[in-house]
Amino acid sequence: QVQLVESGGGLVQTGGSLRLSCAASGRTFSSYAMGWFRQAPGKERELVAGINWGGGITYYADSVKGRFTISRDNAKNTVYLQMNALKPEDTAVYSCAARSFRRGTILFSPGNYDYWGQGTQVTVSS
């Protein structure tokens, strides 16, 4: 069983930055593919950024490409999402997700992930 705990959300003005962290329990974090999803009111959950088990392969949704950066520190069992140049449309609940998956691909669908954090609210004011 893996437990994921997000932190770092909050209220920020347009153009500001936040860094989300997702701390994972367990000794096999380095074998997990990780993803950051977000869900805004009335919208479907979407993959914002994903990273493979080794950190060498990443994915970004077009809407955040060039502004967000996903990274992981396997020694600290933590995955990060650095969010810069935030826009009001980035407002959502952000959740991290994990699945034991030691392959060089990204998992895109929420159904591909086995473990989820509780989510953290990000609000960008205009």
Image (cartoon, rainbow, N blue to C red):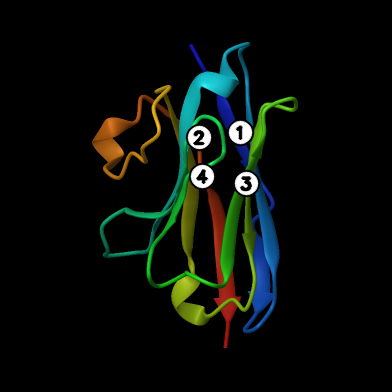
The residue beneath circle 4 is 119
Q: Is residue 67 left or right of residue 58?
A: right
State which tag comes first along the sequence, 2 or 3. Answer: 3
In space, the residues marked 4 and 1 are separated at their CA atoms by 8 Å
Label 3, secondary structure: give it.
strand
Tell me which residue sits at (40%, 73%) in the image: 63
Depth check, mark 1 against mark 3: the one in front is 3
Q: Quadrant of the C terminus?
A: bottom right
Instruction: Report the amino acid beneath label 3.
Output: Ser
In space, the residues marked 1 and 3 are separated at their CA atoms by 16 Å
Label of residue 71 in the image: 3
**Count of labels shown?**
4
Q: Nearer the viewer, residue 77 or 2?
A: 77
The residue beneath circle 2 is 117
The residue beneath circle 1 is 5
In space, the residues marked 4 and 2 are separated at their CA atoms by 6 Å
Label 1, secondary structure: give it.
strand
In space, the residues marked 2 and 3 are separated at their CA atoms by 17 Å
109 shown above or below 16: above
